Amino acid sequence: MRFKPWPRPTPFEDTSRKRAAYRRKQVREQAALPLFAAVVAEHQLDVDEEMVRRTGQWERQQQESRRQRAAGGRRKRERLFALPLARRLAIRALWRVCPYPADPSYLGTLLHEIATGRIDPAQPPWGGRYTLTPRTTPNPTSFDEAFRQIGQRMVGGGPKTTEAAERQFCGNLGRGSCS
């Protein structure tokens, strides 16, 4: 199966901007009820307490979102494995080459579209345009060549120039030498 890994949980970042925004929120809440500003201020948390509360909330929220995503992925795979073997193999082959992002929700979309007849696994609407291509050069002769295609950028300094090409470039600038 092809799935894009979910990013690792990150710690909550306590920044000066978040602290300033929370202070502005406190001022707005007090200004909204000017006669009860003292009562409102009494019930508001200190900035440090609020940042500690947000840290715990952030960790719980990240864990819960990862749990929900994993449960959704399991449900999609259960739907897939409930199908007959021949159909399941055809759908898995289709999933490997389809243009959808490698995410469980998109696998669910593909399964739904197949179940409702919008996509025929034997003749997908994207045809043969999308094929699996490795992100590296097969049988590379050098390190630079092997990793040149990763991220669609030149790795290792890009194309190497020869002295003749450099002289021609520098000559086109109207100088005798580039240095």
Image (cartoon, rainbow, N blue to C red):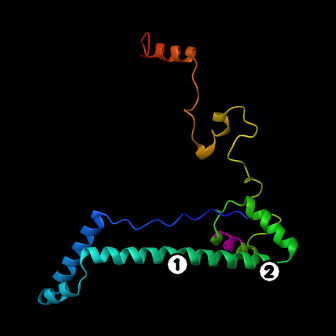
Q: Nearer the viewer, mark 1 or mark 2?
A: 1
Determine the residue positioned at 86% across, 77% down.
Answer: 84
Q: CA distance from mark 1 to mark 2?
A: 27 Å
Q: Percent position (x, y) of residue 76?
A: 69, 76
Q: Percent position (x, y) of residue 131?
A: 75, 53
Vertical placement of residue 123 versus 136, above or below: below
Mark positioned earlier in the residue sequence (1 or 2): 1
* Residue 26 shown left or right of residue 4 in the figure: left
Q: Percent position (x, y) of residue 67?
A: 57, 77
* Residue 124 shown left or right of residue 84 in the figure: left
Amino acid type, residue under disc 1 in the picture? Glu
Q: Is residue 102 or residue 46 the one in the foreground?
A: 46
Residue range of the region highlighted in magenta in the rendering: 106-110
Q: State the residue position of label 1.
A: 64
Vertical placement of residue 55 versus 16, above or below: below
* Residue 60 shown left or right of residue 126 in the figure: left
Label 2: which secondary element: loop
For label 1, the crowd category at 10 Å Cα-Cα, with few meaning under 14, some 14 to 19 and many 20 or more, is few
Tags 1 and 2 touching, CB below 8 Å: no
For label 2, the crowd category at 10 Å Cα-Cα, with few meaning under 14, some 14 to 19 and many 20 or more, is few
Q: State the residue position of label 2.
A: 82
Which corner quadrant of the image does residue 51 belong to?
A: bottom left
- Confirm whether the magenta stretch covers residue 108: yes
Determine the residue positioned at 74% across, 79% down.
Answer: 79
Which corner quadrant of the image does residue 30 belong to?
A: bottom left
**Residue lying furthest right in this view?**
86
- Confirm whether the magenta stretch covers residue 90: no
The label on residue 77 is: none
- Image quarter hosting the N terminus: bottom right
**Residue lying furthest top in this view?**
176
Q: Is residue 164 or residue 122 the one in the foreground?
A: 164
Determine the residue positioned at 70% across, 62% down.
Answer: 2
